Image (cartoon, grey):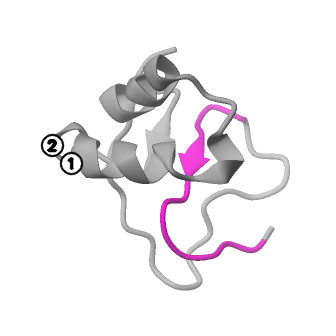
Amino acid sequence: MNSENVALVADYGQARPALQDLANDPSVAVLSASECELFALVGRARPVATGEVLFSRGDAGNSMFVILQGVVAL
């Protein structure tokens, strides 16, 4: 896994607050501390505008989004 494969809504400069948010999220409780750290290390912050399309059905699965705040519709 490298930074091109993971798009995380947290960059390294903000990794500690984002990592704390991620670690406290019950939906990722199955991740170990080192796995959460990996997300924080290789991820990057990316604000998303209301209505912005992150991906469409049929797109190649070459990234991953972790939503730390807000709601998305699939």
Count of numbered tags: 2
* Mark 1 lies on residue: 14
Q: Position of residue 7 (x, y in %)?
A: 47, 41
Asked whether 44 or 29 is in front, the reply is 29
Proximity of marks 1 and 2: CB atoms separated by less than 8 Å: yes
Q: Residue reaching furthest left?
A: 13
Residue 15 is a magenta residue = no
* Mark 2 lies on residue: 13
Question: What range of the chain is rendered magenta?
Answer: 61-73
Q: Identify which residue is drawn at 75% across, 58% down.
A: 56
Residue 70 is a magenta residue = yes
Q: Identify which residue is drawn at 51% across, 50% down.
A: 24
Q: Which mark is residue 66?
A: none
Compared to 37, does 54 lie above or below?
below
Q: Identify which residue is drawn at 36% across, 27% down.
A: 42
Identity, as a three-letter code, of the amino acid under mark 1: Gln
